Amino acid sequence: MNYYVSFGEREELISVEEAGVAQYRVTLGNKTFVVDAHRVEENTWSIILDGRVFEVDLLVGDEEISVYLNGDLYPLKVVNEQQKALSRTKETAEGGKQLLTAPMPGKVVKVLVSEGEEVGPNQGLIIIEAMKMENEFKSSAPGKVKEIFVKEGEVVEGGDKLILIE
Amino acid sequence: MNYYVSFGEREELISVEEAGVAQYRVTLGNKTFVVDAHRVEENTWSIILDGRVFEVDLLVGDEEISVYLNGDLYPLKVVNEQQKALSRTKETAEGGKQLLTAPMPGKVVKVLVSEGEEVGPNQGLIIIEAMKMENEFKSSAPGKVKEIFVKEGEVVEGGDKLILIE
Amino acid sequence: MFSRILVANRGEIAVRVIRACREMGIETVAVYSDVDRHALHVRYADYAYRLGPAPASESYLNMEKIIEVARKSGAQAIHPGYGFLAENAEFAKRLEEEGIKLIGPSSEAMRVMGSKTLARQTVTKAGVPVIPGTLEPLATEEEVVETAREIGYPVMLKAAAGGGGKGMRLVRDESEILSALRMARSEAKSSFGDDSVYIEKYIEKPRHVEIQILADSHGNVVHLFERECSIQRRHQKVIEESPSPFIDDETRKRMGEVAVAAARAVNYENAGTVEFLVDADKNFYFLEMNTRLQVEHPVTEMVTGIDIVKEQIRIAAGEPLSFTQEQVRQVGHAIECRIYAEDPDRNFFPCPGLIERLRTPGGPGVRDDSGVFEGFEIPMHYDPMISKLIVWGKDRAEAIARMKRALSEYVITGVKTTIPFHIRVMNNRHFIEGDFDTNFIDKVFFKEEAERELPEPEVAMLAGAIERFRRELRESLRSKEISGEGIGSLWKYTYRPGFGKKF
Amino acid sequence: MFSRILVANRGEIAVRVIRACREMGIETVAVYSDVDRHALHVRYADYAYRLGPAPASESYLNMEKIIEVARKSGAQAIHPGYGFLAENAEFAKRLEEEGIKLIGPSSEAMRVMGSKTLARQTVTKAGVPVIPGTLEPLATEEEVVETAREIGYPVMLKAAAGGGGKGMRLVRDESEILSALRMARSEAKSSFGDDSVYIEKYIEKPRHVEIQILADSHGNVVHLFERECSIQRRHQKVIEESPSPFIDDETRKRMGEVAVAAARAVNYENAGTVEFLVDADKNFYFLEMNTRLQVEHPVTEMVTGIDIVKEQIRIAAGEPLSFTQEQVRQVGHAIECRIYAEDPDRNFFPCPGLIERLRTPGGPGVRDDSGVFEGFEIPMHYDPMISKLIVWGKDRAEAIARMKRALSEYVITGVKTTIPFHIRVMNNRHFIEGDFDTNFIDKVFFKEEAERELPEPEVAMLAGAIERFRRELRESLRSKEISGEGIGSLWKYTYRPGFGKKF
């Protein structure tokens, strides 16, 4: 099977096939490896590659896979060929949107912007209190506040939409 | 519900009823306790009784329950009233039998007795090799070898019958 | 000696105190809120009593209920740990009235040191150097603006009743001061119920270095040398060590003497910590005195061999210290990493939740002070600290190497933790060289991290592709199995009998 | 210094060596059999290579395969741990030929000390006291009977190539000697491939005390004091401590000197242990020298502060010892309990299997040297040791109290373990008083245990009744649920959201 794996700017086409019990023949660019990959705990894989040992923790989403390796986080996007073809058609439609969601349950202390307002990069948007700490969330890029989904004083759950910037 | 709980020579009639979430009203003899008993891990219970804290590990069989408490093992037999009534009728039929079973996989090195032989208490019956150690198993009481289920050199699984003494 | 002690706390520090008591042959009484019935501190104690619902105000901060439990259980003394009631002078006073011994200082010492302004006045008289700033809370916005001008920017606004970075704001320019004041007051109010704020000179490139002291009821006061606590995020310590890689012997000696003088100024009894800011020229200024056991006390225990909690209990029981200042030695080097249920990749956002899997590091020189177990749900009502990992090495290089090794063995899943963050800090060149101040994490570390090239992108990408391949294979096999084809072929993909049980 | 070391072992000792290497910045090469692919030593190493199927003869004892891996991986040295090839002089010789450094003594020192008879001859010349007995293996049954008569009963039969209690038999009377000889020979044959047996005087009420030595390649030999290893079951050590509660300073000093003399007699290099039997009058007799790292080395590390594995590596790399005999101090007291997958209530029968749940003790002064993790299946092919729990205390009383505390925190389920046994030993009056010899467990402890009244029968019985009640309730609810009644009422019996997940 072939997968498009992206990490940051880099995208690679990686092909994987079985080569024995917990063994995989993997091609990346012009290099082919035989990878010994055992799932040793629920989210943990022990990988031996050319004799070298790696222990990776994987947090697996649908297309997103977070790989923890020696304390470093490698956020990957892994799609198969069908998904890749689909996403090509969608790509042009989106772009430039920032949807701010609540990372955990908390209470909206203050909304610092209003709908229609132009915001700069790194500008404070909203203050959420969680576990007795107030946390200010900022914009990652300039844009215009398209929609505010919450009110001050409202209690939010993790994942709830907060503010949409365009 | 009423249970007959035996520990060694002692047998007690214990009645148990619910008294709240993870709370039980328990009567043993003329004493009644309210016991706060939480199953905190798979085989582990945290019990609070008159303010005193106990952590017990339970190995649960059908009627046998092994209770580990502060490093001590309390092997219990717990039966409800129906089971008690049933066992009364059976009791006379059995008695005096010793069935030796293999505690773990191993290999029969030597059978030290033969069928029909009279054995004394604490007499060597069979030698099993497991994990590179030879272990001799002895009789717990005198009796007569009724049946030998294994041969020398045979590989046995845990729980396999070895020798029956009457 | 006491025969029974009530531990008025939860989490790792309650476990720590219970362990000390158990080793001393003293019975312990745990208290718990509804969400903590399964917690280790309840299970490790000899007695346990419920306090009330989860919110701290109805449980661990409920003084009268705690006193009632102490009475009922026959506890002669109360160890407050840190946080909650540990520095509450009113609680200390209530215990004095009730004739229950608090394992800590007198309510009077607590009252004086608990007010930052009163503390500064008191230690200044004892010859302890303090940071330029106001000694009283400032009432009006005008007063704040005026004082800041006098001291000169940058200045720091601080909650008078505060601690732990809450209600604290750095102001570099007059244009920011009023909004910062409002934020500080609001946090101070919600955290401590008191919005008083004072102001002081902000010291550039400051190090946070503190001295552990022990004082008995016979007038003996000793210090156990320093702890370097400059590695902070959001003004909260996350990594501590002893000795400090920055302090020289002469400064160490003077800081120790000054700390002892500060303790003597309030007739201090029991364990306490005198915190200092140290500038680049090794001038040091009194920050505050913590009148309780400190989170980071284990690093001092590892280098001195002294069990601070056991000493606290002996002191409270009226025993004299069993050693003199001259007998205290710093041997080797110790480092502590605080493991929080926080996401270091999202600004240390708290992540309470269920600990699905826990593997603790082991081997020589490693100590794990934890309050959790696998299957425990970290409640969202309290501090999200999971554990403290402490290592000892014969020197700082060995301690860092050992901490890296131990962190790499530490597995916690189900919640995000600060373990990966700590590994990255241990690998950071500035940290290894001891070249950092309290701004290091926010100002230097994360900038360098953002620029650092990750060393194994290909391995990560291969792992991701294989995971995806295996997942698709499993799904296709499962659908075949459901449709009646290929049953049994699944076995090919389970690698060991019995092992697949949990996964 | 080496840049890469192959660890020719498995389990906790392989993990121990890998930890030391990692902290020293040395890369490690693990080797594994098919059942150990998931084992910690493989996962913690930098490189790993498969040796072969599970049986040791095809994997961890396969010299040529191990040498091939060393070549392929570029390892300059091999650490053999203990067991397997650790005392195999032939392996040492092969490595000498190949120019790969063995982290251990020369093949010649190993050969001499590996033969009990040759060892006794050699050390006797160096003035080391030995136990009366034969110095050569005995060929015929007649010879055995005759020699036993000369020495006088009781006598001990021992495998010439043996160790760890295997192929060892105590004979108190001539009527038992021939069957004992057959057992000893058969065990010796199957364990060591050599059925040679020798005979010696059996010393009544003997203590097993051993001296750790370190010798560098520059002629420096030091000892790190003694370990008391008299707590044994089936002639195998299960609890060790340092210092010995029995040995006085004078005896300690003389034993140290004698141990150093024994080491010098074979030009010993690297770490080794000289084992002695000590009788009730504190006369001591050379038993054997173990030419490798010892299982119980951590107790010495805890009291001396010296990392023996790191010293081994430095010595093998040609570095001189960094300290002198005078600089070695015994500080405080350390105890080790070996945690085996065995059923202490069934004569320590081995219980390999899946570790379903694992909780490691923590807090001050506790060290866990383990080779397992939750979900690991202890293979039945090797020694059933799970881990070693080691504690340090300022004195023996604190060490015992701490060990009890740590054992009570240690949870391993899925297999039976010796943890409950260790708790009972720590509570035994004779153990606490230091009043024991090598027969203590078999002759005294179990007899006292059989007579001891268990302290909490009622709590156990209440727990049993409640468990049964709850089980029946659950079953009746489940059958109602299936029949369509009472769905939802189950919630009443799950006590916390999210918590019921695993149970």
Image: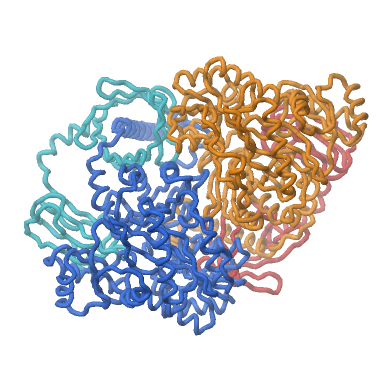
Chain colours: A red, B cyan, C orange, D blue
Residue D498 visible in the snapshot: no
User: Which quarter of the figure has residue B104?
Assistant: bottom left
User: Which quarter of the figure has residue B41?
Assistant: top left
Number of residue marks: 0
Left of B155 or right of it: where is C489?
Answer: right
Residue C71 visible in the snapshot: yes
User: Which residue is the extreme one toward the front?
Assistant: D250
Place of residue D86 in the rendered image (x, y in percent of width and height, measured from the top left): 43, 71
Place of residue D70 in the rendered image (x, y in percent of width and height, measured from the top left): 54, 76
Left of C80 or right of it: where is D93?
Answer: left
Place of residue D427 in the rendered image (x, y in percent of width and height, measured from the top left): 34, 42
State the residue in front, C290 or D264.
D264
User: Which residue is the extreme one toward the top?
Assistant: C97
Q: Is residue D165 above or below residue A93?
A: below
* Residue in view at x 48 percent, y 55 percent: D369
* Residue in view at x 71 percent, y 71 percent: A29
* Residue in view at x 67 percent, y 48 percent: C243
State the residue in front, D133 or C410.
D133
Q: Is residue C199 above or below residue D138?
A: above
Q: Is residue A63 above or below residue C46?
A: below
Left of C407 or right of it: where is C449?
Answer: right
User: Which quarter of the figure has residue C414?
Assistant: top right
Left of C53 or right of it: where is B84?
Answer: left
* Residue in view at x 69 percent, y 63 percent: C456
